[in-house]
Amino acid sequence: MSILHPVLIPIPVAPTLSERRRVVRQRAFARRALEVCARHCGIGNQKWAKDKNDVPQPCSGYHWSISHKPRWAAAVIADRPIGIDIEHIKPRRVELFDEVAGCQEWLLVGGRSQTAFFRIWTAKEAVLKANGVGIAKLLDCRVLAANSADKLRLAYADRVWQVEHFFHQDHLTAVTTDGDELTWHIELGGPWL
């Protein structure tokens, strides 16, 4: 077991930016979260590259994952495939629930609710990121158990994945783990951009 250091960085509101510029800015904050995560892990500056399909590539034996939403960016680094996802918890259309999980999965998390929707969505997204695939495989990733309010076990690609959640403000972040201890870092200060 090792210690993972997921990092969350708030993104200041910039209402005058176009949608395209806002996304570029969010990606920059996610990259900054990755740099801060590397520092917490004791890793020097790295060239964190992605392949032609936008999949993060290992660097010096380390795997990495980033995520961003308009108000938060997140990153994590590990010595094995890893995934992180962050979502703003806000109402979603009920029709989306069937696109995210099957009936048995909903029962495992206590039934259909907005919070359960985001628990399953972020957990599956983190697992798919750890496998270098996109959300087209969402229903191939299955919830096996809800160990607690902040932990899920999922199956994907002939493997069982552990996922831990972190609730903060009105957001939910999920990280794949192998039973690792997580030390969450919320970086509130700093000249990010």
Image (cartoon, grey):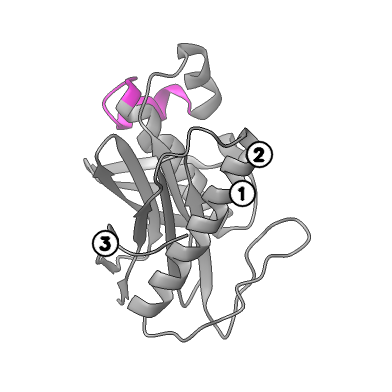
Q: Secondary structure at mark 2?
A: helix
What separation in Å lies between label 2 and label 1 (alpha carbons)?
6 Å
Residue hosting label 3? 184
- Name which residue type carries label 1: Val
Q: Residue at x 30, y 31 (%)?
A: 109
Q: Position of residue 108 (x, y in %)?
A: 31, 32
- CB of mark 2 within 8 Å of CB of mark 1? yes
- In screen coordinates, is 51 left or right of 103? right
Q: Earlier in the sequence, mark 3 or mark 1?
A: 1
Residue 103 included in the magenta stretch of the image: yes
- In screen coordinates, is 153 left or right of 169? right
Residue hosting label 1? 24
Q: Position of residue 85 (x, y in %)?
A: 45, 48
What label does residue 20 carry, if any?
2
What separation in Å lies between label 2 and label 3 (alpha carbons)?
29 Å
- Name which residue type carries label 3: Trp
Seen in the picture, residue 185 relative to 128 is either above or below; the reply is: below
Residue positioned most to the right: 52
User: In front here: 60 or 95?
Assistant: 60
What separation in Å lies between label 3 and label 1 (alpha carbons)?
25 Å
* Dot 2 alpha-carbon crowd within 10 angstroms: few under 14, some 14 to 19, many 20 or more: few
Q: Secondary structure at mark 1?
A: helix
